[in-house]
Amino acid sequence: MGNWRSTDRRGRWQVLFYILCLSALDSVTGQARYSIPEEQSEGSIVGNIGRDLGLEVKRLVSGKARIITKGARQYVDLNRDKGLLVVKERIDREELCGQTTPCSFSFELIIENPIQLYRVTVEVRDTNDNTPSFPKDEIHFKISESAVSGARFSLESAVDPDVGDNGIQNYSLKPTDNFKLEVHSQADGGKYIEMVLQTPLDREEQETLSLMLIATDGGDPQRTGTVRIHITVLDANDNAPVCGQPVYKTDVKESSPKGTLITTVSADDADQGVNGEVTFSIAHVAKEAKELFELDVDTGEIKVVGRLDYEKSRNYQLNVQASDNGGFTDTCKVVIQIIDENDNVPTIQLMSHTNSIPEDSPPGTTVAVINVEDADSDGNGVVLCNINADIPFKIESSLTDYYTIVTDSALDRETVSEYNVTITVSDEGTPPLSSNKNITVKVSDVNDNPPKFDQPVYSKSIQENNSPGFSIFSVRASDADWGQNARVSYFLDDKQVNGVTASSVVSVNSENGAIHAVRSFDYEQIKSFQFNVTARDGGSPPLSSVVAVRILVQDQNDNAPQVLYPVQTSSSLVAEMVPRSADVGYLVTKVVAVDVDSGQNAWLSYKLQKATDKALFEVGLQNGEIRTIRQVNDKDAVKQRLTVVVEDNGQPSRSATVNVNVAVADSFPEVLSEFTDFTHEKEYNDNLTFYLVLALAVVSFLFITCLVVIISVKIYRWRQSRVLYHSNLPVIPYYPPRYADTLGTGTLQHVYNYEVCRTTDSRKSDCKFVRPCSQNVLIMDPSCTGTMQRMQSEQNILDEPDSPLEVSLL
C-alpha cells in the first residue's frame, strides 16, 4: 500500500511510504519507503516508522531496534522512544548519487527477540540549488574567412549537478547574425553543443566577433550560466581537416594499466605547409573522463592515464576536435566501452544470528540472516551462495542479496550437539572469486525445488543450408537443491513439428542441454518451428519443468534472380520497336525479374552491361525500365542489342543477364528487312578465327574448282572446234550438264552458273550458301535445325545490300 504524508519543518515536503510483504519467513517482515528533499536540517522527521510498520514503541525498545547501514555514513537515525526516523546529518543529493536518478539510500531495521528484519528505502529529491557553470569563463576561436556556411565548431557544455527539470534544459547563443546553435545528445545521456556558421565571415569587414553562450536550467527559480565566445577571423585557409572516421568505437579492459593505447584518431588536411598541419584536442568531456584518458595532440593517440572501473562507468565518449593552423576544425566521436573483469571478491556480512537453538525447535526456525554483495556487474556480479552439505540446515533467499539459514529437520542434541556451518559465496566470473564465513548453526536439504530455466521462452536464429549436426545453442536450467537433487537432465518432447516429429528435426543433449540440427534447413520451405524441452532433476521423486524453444531460420542468398520478361528463347526473335520520332525518356520496355529469397537478398537492381549504343538507352536501377536518354535520329542503327544484368543485394550477390533486341524504325517492313538474318546472329566468341579460316578455305576451294572447270571447258570446246574445223561434218550443238541456252545470240551462247559461299557479317562466323537468283534460294540455319526457301527477283536481290551474290561467266 502507499501512504503520502507531509511534515513541516523547513517547508512543506511529502513522504512516500509503502509496505510490501515479501516472504513467508518469520524474520523478514517487509519494507518501507520514504521520500524527502535534499538539504534537510539535522533532526528533521523522515517518518513514523513504528506506526507505518505497525510496531508499538515498547516493541522497538524491548527488541533493541537499531539501524544497520552498508556504508560508512548513516544519514538517518532512529528515535526508539517515539518510533520516528529523523535526519542525522545534512544530505546532499549530488554528493550521494551524482547524476543517478532516482536517488535513494537503503538501510535495515533489525528487532530482536524474536528476530525481525525490515528494509527501509529513503528517496532524496533534488532541489534547484546549483547554477549551471561552464568549465571556462571565455572560449576563443580562430576561424578562417573562407569557412563555408554549415561549418561546425564544438563548444564545451555547461555542468549542472542538479538532475531532471532542475538540470540544464536549453542553450542559447547571442547574437545570431553569423552563427546558430545546435544541441546533440550523446550515448551516455549527456549533451554536446556545436556552433554552426550561417553567414560567411569577412575579415576585412570585421576582424573579431564576441558572442554570449547561455545555459538555462528548468528549476524554480530558474538559474543560468554564461560564457563569452571570442572569435578571431583569419585569412583564407580553404581546406578543413577531415577526420578519418566520424565515430571511433573501441573496447578496453578495466584492468588496463596506465599508458595502454586505446585507439588512434587520424585526420587529413588537403592544405600544405602550416595550414596542413593538424593537431588534436578533446573538445569537451566530463571531468572523470579527463582523469582517465589522455590525447596526444600531434599523433591523435588516446591512452589510459587513470584507473578504469567498470562498476563506476561502463562507457565514455570523447569528442575529439582536429584543427589546422588556419582555424578549420572537424569533430569525431570516440566511444570507449569498458569491459568488465572479475576484480571484486563477494563479501558476506552477518546481520544477526542465534548462538543456540533448542533441540525441539520446529523445522523452519531462523538461525541467521546474512547479506551477500559483489561489486562486479553482469555475470561477474552474479553471486551463488551455499553452505556445506553435511549438516541438517538449508539456506534460503529472503530479499535481494539476503539469505536466511533455517532448520530443515528436527534436531537431536544427544546425537549432535553442535554444527559448524561454512557459508560460501562465489561469483560466476572467470576465474571465479569466492569468500566464506563460519558460524555455529545446524542445517539440511531435500529435493523441493524443480529445475528452472534461465529464460521463460528461448528463441534462436540459424542460417539456412546448415550442415546436419550443427550445434544451434544450449538451454540451461538450474536447480536450487544440492547433489543428485540438483543434477538436471534434458529431454526433447517428441511432438509434431510442421508435419514431422521433433526428433527428426533437432536433438537435445541430455547432459548439457545442447540443441543440434538433425538436418539442413531451407528457409524457402520452413521459416520457423517450435518444440518443447523438459528439464528433469535427479531427485526422488524427480521434479521437472518445460520450456518452449523457437527456432527461426534465416535466409541466405542462395537463389539467383529469375527473369520473367522478356522471355529468352533460342527458336524465335522478340524485338521491341522504337520509332525514330521517340523523345527523351521514351519507354522502350521493362525487364521484369523476381528473386525467391527474402529481405535484402531479394532486392533487385538493374544495370546496362552492354549495348550497341550506350548513349541511346538507360535502364532504371530499381524498376528495370529501359528508356531513351536522347532524341533518336536517322544515324542510329536499326538493330540495337542490349544486355541487362539483374543483380540482388545479397552477400555475395547473385545475378542474371537478359538480352533485349530493339528495332529503331517507323514501319514493320523496314524492321523485317533489317531483322531477316537477326535470329542467326550469335555472340562473339573465341571460335571466330576458326570459322573465318574455314569460310576462306571453302571459298578458295570453290573458286579454284570453278577456274579448273572453266579452263577445262574452254580447252574442250577449243579442241572440238578444231576437230570440226578440219572436218566437213555438220556442227551439232552440244550442251553439257549445267549449261543453258539463254538468249541465243552473242559470241558465247551458253551461260555457266556456279555457287559461292560468303559470310553475312565479317564479325560473325556464320556462312551462307547461295545459289543463283533465278533458282530457289536455300538459307541454312547455323544450328542445322531447318531450311527456308523463298523466291526473289533478280532486281530485288541485286538491290538488297545483303542479297546473295550471283556470279556468271559468259
Image: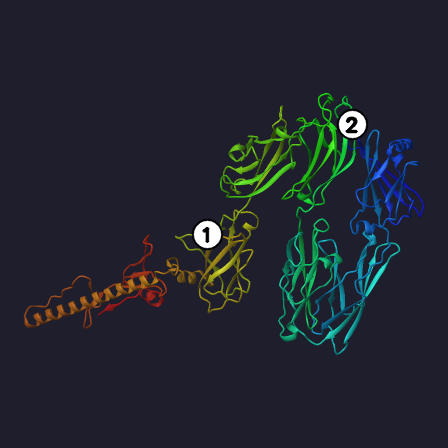
**Kind of residue sitting beneath label 2:** Ser
What is the residue that sits farthest to the bottom in this orientation?
204
Dot label at residue 33: none
Colour scheme: rainbow
Instruction: Name the quadrant containing residue 236.
Output: bottom right
Estimate how packed mark 2 is, as few (under 14), some (14 to 19) or many (20 or more) residues with alpha carbons within 10 Å: few
Quarter of the image for the C terminus: give it: bottom left
Circle 1 sits on which residue? 567
Q: Nearer the viewer, residue 379 or 408?
A: 408
Could you give the CA–CA distance between mark 1 and mark 2, rounded to whole angstroms? 94 Å
Secondary structure at numbered mark 1: loop
**Residue occupying the point 87% across, 35% down:** 52
**Kind of residue sitting beneath label 1:** Val
From the top left corner, tell me how far across and down residue 20 is, in percent: 80, 35
Going from the N terminus, do you reach mark 1 or mark 2 first?
2
Q: Is residue 177 left or right of residue 80?
A: left
Circle 2 sits on which residue? 356
Q: Nearer the viewer, mark 1 or mark 2?
A: 2
